[in-house]
Image (cartoon, rainbow, N blue to C red):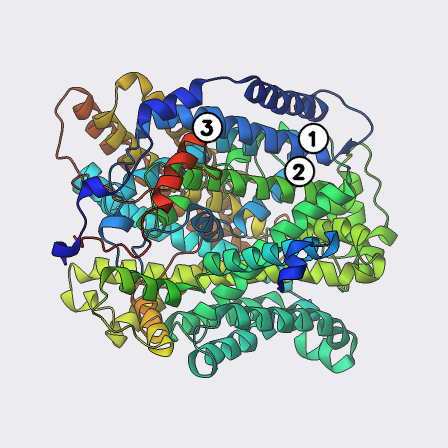
Amino acid sequence: MGASSEASPSGLSRLFSGGLAGARGAVAYLRGVMGADAYERYCAHLAVRHPDQQPPTEKQFWREHMDWLEKNPQGRCC
Amino acid sequence: MSNIAPDQTELPPAAVDPQVADEYDRRWTPQKIVTWVLVALVGAVAWAMIAIVRGETINAIWFVFAAASTYLIAFRFYSKYVERHITKPDDTRATPAEYRDNGKDFMPTDRRVLFGHHFAAIAGAGPLVGPVLAAQMGYLPGTIWIIVGVVLAGAVQDYLVMFFSMRRGGRSLGQMAREELGIIGGTAALIATLTIMIIITAILALVVVNALGASPWGVYSVGLTLPIALFMGVYLRFLRPGKVMEVSVIGFVLLMFAIISGRWVAESAWGAELFHLDRTTIAWMIIIYGFIAAVLPVWLLLAPRDYLSTFMKIGVIFLLAIAIIVVRPEVNFPAVSEFASRDDGPVVPGSLFPFLFVTIACGALSGFHALISSGTTPKLVEKERQTRFLGYGGMLMESFVAIMALVAAITIDRGIYFAMNSSAAATGGTVEGAVAFVNSLGLSGVNLTPDMLSELARNVGEESVVSRTGGAPTLAVGIATVLHQWFGGTALMGFWYHFAIMFEALFILTAVDAGTRVARFMLQDTIGNFIPRFKDTSWTVGAWICTAIMVAGWGYILVLGVTDPLGGINTFFPLFGIANQLLAVIALSVVMTIVARKVESKYLWVVVLPLAFAAVITVTASMFKIFSSVPAVGYWAQNSAFRTALDEGKTSLGTAKTVEAMEAVVRNTTVQGTLSVVFVVLTLIVLVTSLIATARAMRGKVGVDTEDPRIESRIFAPASLFATPPERELEEEWEKVPVTRPVRHH
């Protein structure tokens, strides 16, 4: 993180940080596909669209999400 | 809020100028030409290796190349043709995700994330099972149908349904059918959908039962997924709400433990006794499970199991693709086998036409996808142009899974394949019986010995591999054969086998309970037209009654399949494919009606071609099943043969050795034959109403426009996986716009 390592990054550390960024990207992607980021996305949505509204707590959000799923079953294919 | 919304002129355009985009598309730089010539060459060589060059064996890698290059060409050229002439997307038009954005089910979602999301929803056990069963006809017919079928039929259906649903605010296929085909066509489509869900659920459950019957290891490890899912549900609800990835990783680790410890349990005396269950018992357990899972709160079982299933799905498909590329196994099957032209194949009866096309449904053309492609995904699409990547591309991906399943299945010994997939009625369920039966088939190059079967059973940790029909165990052996060469050797074959069984069971059980739930809501909605109280989905009594009706429906067929004296999979599986193709006929009929109103009739063939093919397949296969005089093929022929024998006072016929078994055959064939009649009648009703609607549209009597009104888009994103240079330029312009810009809420 220091300025010195940024100035002369060795090949290994560059590879490492590149790998780390790749892994982070992969985790973020997987989270998106599985819908694990639903809460963050909803808060971001509120911040832009309804800045006057207080976002729900994470627990509250997921409870409402599950209640919604209860009434809107998502099909899974064969 | 509109007072703070910036004027439209402040924002960059919401779409690349169509002319600029078109120019880029049509400008053939040397680099582009070289790339596509190379793709075409690789494809041509791979297809030649598969179809024409016949050595002793052929390497599985050629299937991967043939499939991948064909998909690339189809995606780049054919799907663009469909886009240019049929869908004509307009990126200046807001999608439902944008104009109805609620941060939840309507929300613009990154196209790459949505691709994964959509793929996880459409891909399941179907593309894994069908190709395995169709391998009895040789690898070539199945390969051609999977690849050509997806390009011209399956991917077109998924793409068009998704696009038209998106233009209608994410309406479901059922709603669109009512709007486009009128009350008769719409009702027929609804009844067909409900019947099909019953059939598909029953036959998927039958696949699981066959994989777990008399398998203590399998029963134990698949059984453990229930407490694991319950634990995950409680964890997410009370301990760490929203930590989906964390709990999925924990669930995955527990799952691995369930598979590994399965060997210890199965090898212990108590474990073998406790978990050795016969198939009828397992069928009843799945029926009870199906009911409970569908009425339990979603957070407790369904949602966590769905996370686990999605997690496994993505992992397994990557694993399999890498393993096939690394191991490059040799194929032991002929290109076209003896059974392609005969109608007495022991795995599924019937000749290549039409039965290849109903045995492989998912992977080439799957009507069920129309239910997923309408509704969920269209509400999340960011830009209209992305539907080509999501709908067409997503289905290409599923087709690739089907090809990998086919490859895994045809790398195992052909004698073993037939020993595993011939019904117990043919093999007697014993090693000796299986060897005698398979060798009596007179297949070239097949010389099965008892040692081969018992050694395989020992390696995969099963008591027996004889007559494990349904495709799942065969695929598991194929996957274990490929993976153990890459990692772990023979010592890990049992692990890989049960790993494969586990994820297939996981996919199927998720489809079973999600399907039961979806069908329950549809049934409640339908009954609600007569008894309004049923429309209230939170009314417990109504929910329980409708769930019980649906579970009774598929449970009945499941039990018939499990106890079928003639086998089970071989007699019931054709109904699965016919039902799925019937749903495709319905979806394509709806699409044809819409397209006929919208575009020049000279391009209508894009929809007519797959629709006509699916209709011919469904109707012909049903006709064979209803009218064929060959008992193995025709349900009523079988029915009357057994009826006559019973009337004559015989106490056994063929593989039915008792009067009860003979009566069971009469009962089963009555159910199967009746369903075939129902399917063909429903297909014809939908087809006729759609043809009438299409003809009216073509005569210029344009009905009501069913699209949602146009709203200007105020966001931008590239259309496909990679941004083109013009898209990149526009993206850079958008990046300069402050992120938290307030947007007018419609």
Label located before the other in sequence (3 or 2): 2
Label located before the other in sequence (2 or 1): 2
Mark 1, Cα crowd under 10 Å, few <14 / some 14-19 / many 20+, is some
Q: Residue at x 51, y 34 (%)?
A: B357
Q: Can residue B563 be seen in this view?
A: no
Relative to the observer, which residue lies in front, B670 or B83?
B83
What secondary structure is marked by label 3?
helix
Picture coordinates of residue B560 (x, y %)? 50, 58
Q: Residue at x 66, y 45 (%)?
A: B321
Relative to the observer, which residue lies in front, B599 or B451?
B599
Closer to the camera: disc 3 or disc 2? 3
The relative height of residue B495 versus residue B295 in the rendered view (above or below) is above
- Mark identifier at residue B337: 1
- Drawn side of residue B474 relative to residue B391, left or right: right
Pointer 3 chain: B
Query: In which quarter of the view is residue B281 placed?
Result: bottom right
- Mark identifier at residue B136: 2
Query: In which quarter of the view is residue B241 placed?
Result: bottom left
The amino acid pointed to by label 3 is Leu
Say if labels 2 and 1 share a chain.
Answer: yes
Tags 2 and 1 touching, CB below 8 Å: yes
Picture coordinates of residue B392 (x, y %)? 44, 36
Residue identifier under label 3: B152
What secondary structure is marked by label 2?
helix
